[in-house]
Image: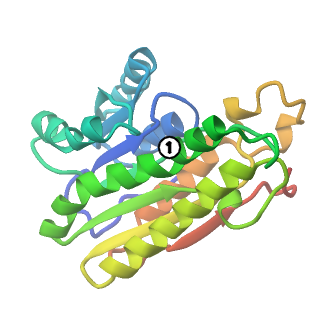
C-alpha cells in the first residue's frame, strides 16, 4: 500500500475520469485508502455508479463527489474545472485520465463509427480534460497528469486496430505534454497496463485468473504519484506476472 509522500502537506484532491466502474473505481478506492482525508472528484456518465463509488470512498474517510460528464464533449469538459472548484474550493493536485473503451476489431472490420468511438473515448477525452485543467496547474507550478494508456499504446496486437491507434496517440499526447512542461513543476505519467480484469473481458472466454486485478494496478498508480516531487515515473508498463494474454 502506498504511503503519503512527504512532499504533500495536505490530503490531495484527485480528479479521476471513468470512475464509475473497473479501474477507475479501483483508483478512487486506492487513493481513498492511501491518503486519509483525500478529496476525490469522480467523473463519469453513469450517475448511479458514480454515487456508489463515492459512497465506498467516503466510508474510507475521503470526501468524494461525483460529476456526471461526457468527457468527449468539449463544452461539458470546459465546465468541469469550475464545477470541481465549486465543490472543493481549490483546483486538483492530480488528474487521472482513465476514461476509455475497448472494441476489438481487425483493421478490415473497423468501421468509421468504431474508429471515431475509440479515438473519442480514449484520446480526445484525455486531451480535453488535460486542456481544461492545465491552466490551473501551470499557474500553481505543480500537479500530476496521469494518462492510463495500455500495453497497446506501446506494441501492436492483432484485432485491436482502432484501439491501438488511440492508445498510441494517448502515449504520444503524454509525451508531447511532458516535453512542453518539463522543468515547470508539473509531472506527466503514462501508465501502460496489460490485461486487467475489467468488464472489457466479459464473454471473451479468457481465463480471468491470468489477468491483473484492478486494485493491483490502482495501487501501483497511487504509489507512482506518491513519489517525491523531485522524481517522476514517466512511462511505466504493468503486465500480468504470467505473461501477456
Q: Give the image location of residue 117, x and y in percent.
A: 57, 38
Which residue is denoted by mark 1 in the rendering? 120
Residue at 35% across, 65% down = 5
Asked where in the image residue 208 lies, by quadrant, the reply is top right
Residue 104 occupies quadrant: top right
Left of 136 or right of it: where is 185? Answer: right
Left or right: where 202 falls relative to 224: right
Q: Is 47 placed above or below 201 here?
A: above
Determine the residue positioned at 41% across, 40% down: 17
In the image, is 142 to the left or to the right of 71? left
- Position above or below: 226 against 51: below
Q: Is residue 239 visible in this depiction of the protein?
A: yes
Q: Residues within 10 Å of mark 1 (few under 14, many from 20)?
A: some
- Residue toward you, 119 or 113: 113
Number of labels in the image equals 1
Residue 194 lies, with reference to residue 100, above or below; the image says below
Where residue 240 sits in the image (x, y, percent)?
78, 54
Q: Position of residue 179 (x, y in %)?
A: 39, 81
88 in relation to 131, above or below:
above
From the viewer's side, name the closer residue of 139 and 105. Answer: 105
Most extreme residue toward the top is 48
Residue located at (80% from left, 40% from top): 109
How was the colour assigned to the protein in this rendering? rainbow
Say what secondary structure mark 1 lies in. helix
Q: Can residue 93 be seen?
A: no
Q: Pinpoint residue 71: horizontal percent, then vertical percent.
A: 38, 38
Who's the residue at 17% across and 35% down the image? 83
Amino acid at each position: 500500500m502506498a504511503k503519503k509522500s512527504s512532499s504533500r502537506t495536505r490530503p490531495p484532491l484527485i480528479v479521476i475520469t471513468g470512475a464509475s466502474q473497473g479501474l477507475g473505481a479501483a483508483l478512487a478506492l486506492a487513493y481513498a485508502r492511501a491518503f486519509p482525508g483525500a478529496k476525490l472528484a469522480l467523473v463519469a456518465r453513469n450517475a448511479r455508479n458514480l454515487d456508489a463509488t463515492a459512497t465506498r470512498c467516503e466510508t474510507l474517510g475521503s470526501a468524494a463527489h461525483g460529476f456526471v460528464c461526457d468527457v468527449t464533449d468539449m463544452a461539458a469538459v470546459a465546465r468541469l474545472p469550475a464545477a470541481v472548484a465549486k465543490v472543493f474550493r481549490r483546483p486538483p493536485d492530480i488528474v487521472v485520465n482513465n476514461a476509455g473503451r475497448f472494441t476489438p476489431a481487425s483493421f478490415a472490420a473497423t468501421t468509421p463509427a468504431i474508429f471515431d468511438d475509440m479515438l473519442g473515448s480514449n484520446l480526445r477525452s484525455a486531451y480535453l480534460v488535460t486542456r481544461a485543467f492545465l491552466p490551473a496547474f501551470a499557474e500553481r507550478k505543480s500537479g500530476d497528469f496521469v494518462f492510463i494508456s495500455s500495453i497497446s499504446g506501446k506494441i501492436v496486437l492483432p484485432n485491436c486496430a482502432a484501439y491501438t491507434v488511440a492508445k498510441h496517440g494517448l502515449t504520444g499526447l503524454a509525451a508531447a505534454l511532458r516535453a512542453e512542461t518539463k522543468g515547470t513543476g508539473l509531472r506527466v505519467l503514462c501508465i501502460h497496463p496489460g490485461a486487467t480484469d475489467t468488464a472489457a473481458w466479459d464473454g471473451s472466454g479468457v481465463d480471468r485468473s491470468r489477468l491483473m486485478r484492478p486494485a493491483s494496478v490502482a495501487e501501483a498508480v497511487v504509489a507512482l504519484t506518491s513519489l517525491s516531487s523531485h522524481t517522476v515515473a514517466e512511462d511505466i508498463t504493468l503486465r500480468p506476472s504470467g505473461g501477456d494474454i
